[in-house]
């Protein structure tokens, strides 16, 4: 069964249709790229646009560009080690397949986020201006909402991906091990890349910028450790 | 002999709880411990990741073919990883860090080779010294290859992190992950050669890991800045040195002020 990279692949991917992914992996790897890359650009782009919209059109455009870039940057930085780990863990998955799996996972996440973007779009249109007294409260609400939605999309897409990896790997145990190795690496690097590409929501009172003046100065983990140190006094 | 058609009742069987949990012990060589199909450069790289035991097997049969490739892979990969580590401080560290990483890893391998041979033999491994040397080289090549896989991740943090302590521990964590994969190959190879009994190789693995950790202090600085290439006069134990570095960073006046950090923390 050959699937064309069209809208018809969207429901199949959402259902976790194994023949779709097997077809992409075995018969036509190009089709997975032709489907997943535009899906990530459009889905994450649309959702990112609504994330920054409450700060105005400029911020919305910036985040619309940056959110897909975060995903591609994570895949680029982790691509080599993901492929190597898949092989070293005995999953039978090679470099190309590992990229295809992860692209399919992120593609599904982008589709979920894209489908939620009309809701977040309307939410942003109802937001108070960043200069209003209620802006700080709205910022907290929008931060929590987006965190919840992105986490939901991430969990659902990765759960689906786990099923595919277990089916494709030499044994389900090898597949599970490989999947969690990828997940750990992607979360670790993803947090730092998102931190470098900040701001996404835009805290009230701070400048609207594509990237901060010193994006590569410091790391997400140092900031978290410092914040913990401030809280605990160590 | 009786003509009773009803067979006598068998006494009820007492279930043996151990029987459910015992599995047949699989002995003999690992299925991957066989000759490689192709021996080109890319096939050796592929086999190092997918079927490392075939490389060990090949080394036992005809070492001259693969030895050079394994040495080259280890040297280049460790050099690249060292260069990426050197990016943290830049300047002279761009050449000093690769030299120290290559030297440190190979020197650790060299001084731990006799103990690998002895500890392997204690566990029942039936291998000659050249085979154990080949196993060590395969182990170093796999570890180095995985380190290169992590190089983009290390680069990301080397160019953005301000904390020597954080970057140092990240590098050590990555080294340990790669080391685990390499040590797994030693364990599998040892079992394929009749060994792996008594946990002797686990002790050797701890010794090797400790030696490499001490190397980070003996060859200091690998990621930090210094006027001298090596500081061999001042002998230190790695844990003591690390605690000193952590203390220094906490009291350093050049560190970001809490206000700056708080501003960053609220920036989302």
Image: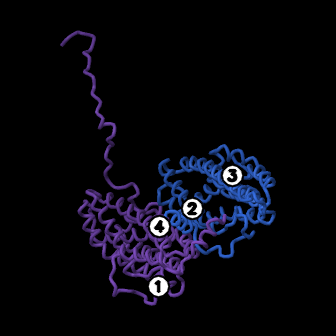
Chain colours: A blue, B purple
Chain ID for label 3?
A
Q: Is residue A60 visible?
A: no
Q: Do labels 1 and 3 share a chain?
A: no
Q: Which of marks 1 and 3 is in front?
A: 3
Between the C-alphas of marks 2 and 1, the distance is: 32 Å
Residue appearing at x 64%, y 45% in the figure: A16
Between the C-alphas of marks 2 and 3, the distance is: 35 Å
Q: Is mark 4 on a helix, strand or loop?
A: loop
Between the C-alphas of marks 1 and 3, the distance is: 49 Å
Chain ID for label 2?
A
* In the image: residue A36, left or right of residue B17: right
Q: Give the farthest residue toward the front.
A: A133
Asked whether the beta carbons under mark 1 and mark 4 sit within 8 Å of each other, the answer is no
- Residue A145 tag number: 3
Q: What element carries label 2?
A: helix
For label 4, the residue is: A234
- x, y (%) of residue B108? 35, 75
Q: Residues within 10 Å of mark 1 (few under 14, many from 20)?
A: some
Q: Do labels 4 and 3 share a chain?
A: yes
Q: Nearer the viewer, mark 4 or mark 3?
A: 4
For label 2, the residue is: A95
Chain ID for label 1?
B
Q: Can residue B25 be seen in this view?
A: yes
Q: Which of marks 4 and 2 is nearer the N terminus?
A: 2
For label 1, the residue is: B96
Quadrant (top left/top right/bottom left/bottom right) for the N terminus of chain A: top right
B18 in relation to A169, above or below:
above
Along the line of sight, the residue nearer the viewer: A140 or B215: A140
């Amino acid at each position: 069964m050959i699937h064309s990279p069209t809208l018809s692949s969207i429901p199949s991917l959402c259902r976790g249709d194994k023949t779709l992914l097997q077809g992409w992996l075995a018969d036509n790897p190009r089709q997975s790229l032709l489907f997943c890359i535009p899906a990530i650009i459009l889905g994450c782009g649309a959702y990112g646009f609504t994330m920054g919209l409450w700060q105005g059109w400029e911020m919305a455009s910036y985040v619309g560009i940056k959110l897909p870039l975060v995903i591609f940057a994570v895949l680029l930085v982790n691509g080599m080690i993901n492929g190597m780990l898949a092989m070293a863990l005995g999953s039978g998955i090679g470099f190309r397949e590992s990229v295809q799996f992860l692209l399919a996972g992120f593609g599904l996440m982008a589709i979920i986020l894209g489908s939620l973007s009309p809701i977040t779009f309307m939410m942003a249109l109802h937001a108070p201006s960043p200069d209003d007294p209620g802006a700080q409260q709205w910022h907290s609400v929008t931060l929590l909402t987006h965190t919840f939605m992105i986490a939901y999309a991430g969990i659902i897409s990765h759960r689906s991906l786990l099923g595919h990896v277990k089916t494709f790997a030499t044994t389900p145990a090898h597949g599970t091990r490989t999947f969690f190795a990828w997940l750990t690496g992607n979360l670790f690097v993803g947090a730092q890349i998102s931190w470098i590409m900040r701001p996404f929501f835009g805290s009230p009172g701070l400048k609207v910028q594509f990237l901060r003046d010193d994006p590569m100065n410091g790391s997400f983990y140092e900031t978290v450790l410092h914040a913990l140190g401030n809280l605990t006094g160590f | 002999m009786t003509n009773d058609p009803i067979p006598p009742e068998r006494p009820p069987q007492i279930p043996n709880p151990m029987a459910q949990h015992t599995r047949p012990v699989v002995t003999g060589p690992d299925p991957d411990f066989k000759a490689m199909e192709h021996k080109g450069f890319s096939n050796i790289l592929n086999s190092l990741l997918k079927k490392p035991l075939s490389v060990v097997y090949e080394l036992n049969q005809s070492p001259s073919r693969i030895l050079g490739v394994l040495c080259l892979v280890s040297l280049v990969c460790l050099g690249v990883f060292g260069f990426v580590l050197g990016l943290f401080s830049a300047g002279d560290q761009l050449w000093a860090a690769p030299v120290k990483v290559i030297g440190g890893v190979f020197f650790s391998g060299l001084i731990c080779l006799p103990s690998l041979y002895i500890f392997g033999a204690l566990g029942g491994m039936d291998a000659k010294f050249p085979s154990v040397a080949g196993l060590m080289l395969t182990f170093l090549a796999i570890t180095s290859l995985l380190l290169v896989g992590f190089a983009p991740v290390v680069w990301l943090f080397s160019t953005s992190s301000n904390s020597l302590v954080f970057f140092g521990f990240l590098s050590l964590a990555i080294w340990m992950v790669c080391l685990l994969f390499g040590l797994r190959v030693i364990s599998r190879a040892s079992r394929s050669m009749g060994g792996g009994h008594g946990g002797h190789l686990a002790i050797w693995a701890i010794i090797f890991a400790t030696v490499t950790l001490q190397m980070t202090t003996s060859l200091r600085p690998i990621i930090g800045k210094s006027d001298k290439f090596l500081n061999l006069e001042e002998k230190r134990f790695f844990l003591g040195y690390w605690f000193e570095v952590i203390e220094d960073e906490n009291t350093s006046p050049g560190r970001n002020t809490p206000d700056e950090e708080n501003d960053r923390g609220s920036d989302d």
